[in-house]
Image (tube, rainbow, N blue to C red):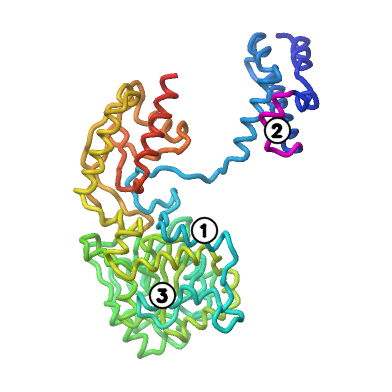
Amino acid sequence: MTSIEKQVALRSLPAVGHLLEFPQTLSVFADYPLALVTRFLGEAVAELREMWDRDPAPGDDAWAQMVLPESIIQRAHRILNVYLSPHLRPVLNLTGTVIHTNLGRAPLSERALQAVHDVASQYSNLEYDLTPGKRGSRHDHVAKRLCALTGAEAALVVNNNAAAVLLALRSLAQGGEAVVSRGQLVEIGGSFRIPDIMVQAGVLLKEVGTTNKTHLRDYQQAIGENTRLILKVHTSNYRIVGFVHQPPLADLVELARQRQVPLFEDLGSGALFDFPDFGVGDEPTVSNSIRAGVDLVSFSGDKLLGGAQAGILLGKQDVVAKLRSHPWMRALRVDKMTLAALEATLVAYADSDMARKEVPVVRMITASYEEMTKQAAVLEKAIAADEVLAKVLDVEQVDAVSRIGGGALPLTELPTRCLRLQAKGLTAQQFSDQLRHVPQVPVITRIAHDAVLCDPRTLLPGQEGLMLDSLRQWAQELTV
């Protein structure tokens, strides 16, 4: 079309005021405020105007259909639905990575979800002591449970483990030195590095030993009049193997007592459940460190613990008291929903069988290969029996390994049984991309040997139907 024809076409667009008077507008937007309806009708008209700045411009027949009031109203309704839909939404994790950092880490237990709902939808005793009827502390709701589970004298919760480390360093060692092994100068996600965080905390880093070997004598020689802290960092997201040595924790505890310097252990992921007892990895438990006599321990709430994002600090009463009274504490404290989810998660740790049953992360990590085989067989049968899916998908079971993820137990492989899916006429990458974009509930998978793998280990109970629905939505879009 010529520029004159373009102007003629644009003049054919109805005015927003006219669209507001159209009967269909009243029925489609009956539940929405007038200002919102006016806004999105205007955006729909603006979208049509912008089409003339693209190449190619709309054809005559297509344009005549698009400028009909009914078409513009439906376009405005689609724009409104996109606007009202949350950007943060559920997905199906079929990657086999249990604590998937990009997919929200630990899913909460049913007990935790109910606790969050109850506390968030009503008033609560967040900072109110019901017994005397006066102001209380939000930390008391979880401190007693944490101490009972670990044997610690006192506990404190902040918004994540990075904040816990920062608060501990600032409170205990500002203006002085913290002694740490070179083999423990870790970096976690987001370029969070121990040396950098020490700078921000106003603490001087005093490295001892070498990357692969640090001896007790290295600590003994490094401690001086300016030493404020001994820092031990658990290398939860990597392992140094071979010709290596680190002094036993008991020796560091004894040295800290002799020199009257607090020992702070950053456990990173942190575990209240004894995974080695179930044949999974070698992760030390938090209670082991407390029993050994460590003055302060920190770890995450949303990794191996399987709760909400939080940084948990446990240890001696006088040490935790220093952190609790620090001015930064108010900036780092957690909200009522985090506390509710954490407390409800901790309830399950009163018994290992209860934890395996209730806490999704614990259940998934300890699930056996035989359990995964049964689940994969059920899903394979359901896909093969579906008339729509059977036409476009080839499915078979294959052996594979799941990962724990979240910077925890990096060398641990969990034997699993996956579904190997191949979509007819599509590469594995194309199929995987479409599973993310087409279904209402996106399916996140992994690719191996030019096929999509779906690992049932990270499919939550009751999500089998959602998985099949998402596959059907993809298949129906493909066959339209």
- Which amino acid, mark 1? His
Camera-near label (1 vs 2) is 1
* Front one among 310 and 212: 310
User: Is residue 344 visible in the rendered structure shown here?
Assistant: yes
Q: Are marks 1 and 3 in contact (CB under 8 Å)?
A: no
Residue bearing mark 2: 40
Q: Separation of disc 3 and disc 2 at Cα?
A: 51 Å
Residue 219 horizontal side relative to residue 141, left or right: left
Residue 195 horizontal side relative to residue 372, left or right: right
Task: Locate the C terminus by quadrant.
Answer: top left
- Which amino acid, mark 3? Arg
Who comes first in sequence, dot 1 or dot 2? 2
Q: Position of residue 430 (x, y in %)?
A: 40, 28
Q: Is residue 260 above or below residue 129?
A: below
Q: Which residues are magenta?
A: 23-34
Residue bearing mark 3: 145
Task: Say the numbered circle drawn on residue 476.
Answer: none
- Image quadrant where residue 11 sits: top right
* Front one among 343 and 175: 343
Number of residues whose C-alpha sits closer than 10 Å to that of mark 2, classed few (under 14), some (14–19) or many (20 or more): many
Q: Separation of disc 1 and disc 3 at Cα?
A: 21 Å
- Which amino acid, mark 2? Phe
Label 2's element?
helix
Residue 199 horizontal side relative to residue 262, left or right: right
Residue 357 horizontal side relative to residue 469, left or right: left
Q: Position of residue 12 (x, y in %)?
A: 76, 15
Residue bearing mark 1: 117
Name the residue rendered at 78%, 10% in the picture: 4
Q: Separation of disc 1 and disc 2 at Cα?
A: 33 Å
